[in-house]
Amino acid sequence: MKNTKEKFLNKYKLLDRRLNTDPDRNYEYLVNFSQTKNIPVHRWFYYQEGYSPDLVKNIFTEINLKSNARILDPFCGSGTSLVVAKELGYDSLGVEINPFSAFASEVKTRNYTTSEIKQIGEFANKDFSLTKKVKSLDIEFSLLGRLFTPGRLNKLLQIREQIDNLQNIRVKNICFFAWLSVLEKVSNYRRGGNGLKKRIRINKVDPVVEFKNRLKEIYNDLSHLSSIHHEPGIINDSSINLKKYDVGKFDVAIFSPPYANCFDPFEVYKIELWMGGFVRNYEELRNKRKTALSSNLNASIEKVFNLDNMPEILADIISYLRKNQLWDTRLPYMLNNYFIQMREVLQALFGKLEKNGYCAIVVGNSAYGTLPVPTDTILGLIGEDIGFRCKKIIVARTNETSSQQHLKIGNLKEYLRESIVLLRK
Ligand SMILES: C[S@@+](CC[C@H](N)C(=O)[O-])C[C@H]1O[C@@H](n2cnc3c(N)ncnc32)[C@H](O)[C@@H]1O
């Protein structure tokens, strides 16, 4: 066992040298969303898988991006790259599988007219006298009955009724987004780990106050945004299908794919997906989950191993994991599927990038059994096999784990890290 670990460590170190892997602590706090709480527009919704807008800006500086560049984010989530691209005057396109996240990206990046901004401000200051009792939602969502107190649900639904009556579609959409953005805060559940957890303390926040505060924040941010810029295109589809779209060439693809860590990107946003009508029944939700990247066990996992065109290190890892007892026997398949799909996405990106274009991938490694899987290195190697040059892998941070897990992982713990893989066409 010890010998096997030593062998992996030596191989990982060799690959680190080959791919020019080095830490850069300037990125330590930029690979996550926690820095965005006070940043206009980005602060409208806390997207826990997101990265910081400064990360996008730093990468643009690092690659010396030209002034008329086009930007692509094939996993655009809540739209961080697109909001930055728009702010800096770049044309951009985002692709995102989760319809709620795609909607968030859209409302954050539209050009609102002065009159629309005024209407948003007026709606935020409206006197919501919510006294009547409205009919509850007729949706399959099994958690609905426990999600809100009856009084809060009634208030939420009355606000929603008034949003539905708005005439201007952009104003309606952004007010609806503000409504969606406060649902978790006013509910009996909170996002935690890989899903929702019941709150221990009784939640006393008022839906009307939260909604109005959020809409006022949106109004203030929009009132201070300068001039009209390109509205990004947003495609609500899997980035595996990117090759089918005739969207022209791009100078940089900057993105963070789901990490291969078993987190289901649909599970954490299920309140918004159901309450927002983005999914109407369980079958629809299941189907959507299956089209997400195979980074978790709710996605579609083909139970066959296919290591053609895959780096040798992945074959070694999969062979090691197959011999070890893991908490789910599908995990080695999931990993194999994940890298096959990422190869397809990188291949499509190679076709969509201009000559000398860049691909910046922000990704975290995961661990199975007691073996860290260096997703950053493997993506760098797959990129090279496709025809990119791996310029460098910037190690932004090393993740903390419980001390028990640390002990088991031993010397390999430095591979539990988040990095930026910088590829050039
Ligand atoms: C790490 S998050 C990206 C966050 C984004 N950078 C931001 O700052 O908001 C990864 C995103 O990929 C999306 N995703 C998962 N599978 C996908 C697929 N096959 N195609 C496109 N998007 C996908 C998830 O829904 C999630 O929003």
Image (cartoon, rainbow, N blue to C red):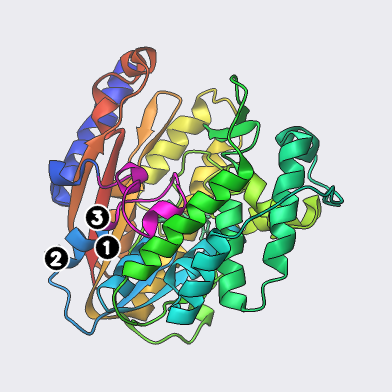
How far apart marks 2 and 1 lie (CA) works out to: 23 Å
Ligand 1 is within 8 Å of the C-beta of the residue at disc 3:
no
Label 1 packing within 10 angstroms: few (<14), some (14-19), many (20+) = some
Q: Which residues are magenta?
A: 30-55
71 or 390, which is in the foreground? 71
Label 2 residue SS: helix
Q: Nearer the viewer, mark 2 or mark 1?
A: 2
Q: Amino acid at mark 2?
A: Thr
Residue 380 placement (x, y as % from top left): 28, 55
On screen, residue 20 versus residue 160, left or right, reads left
On screen, residue 21 versus residue 142, left or right, reads left
Q: Which label sits on residue 384?
A: 1
Residue 102 placement (x, y as % from top left): 54, 64
The dominant secondary structure in magenta is: loop
Label 3 residue SS: helix
Of marks 3 and 2, which one's residue comes earlier in the chain?
A: 3
Ligand 1 is within 8 Å of the C-beta of the residue at disc 2:
no
Residue 219 seen in the current view: yes
Q: Which residue is mark 2?
A: 61
Residue 198 placement (x, y as % from top left): 64, 26
Q: Which residue is mark 3?
A: 55
Whether label 1 touches label 3, CB < 8 Å: no
Total marks shown come to 3
How far apart marks 1 and 3 lie (CA) works out to: 24 Å
- Residue drawn at point x = 32 percent, y = 70 percent: 225
Q: In which quarter of the view is residue 424 placed?
A: bottom left
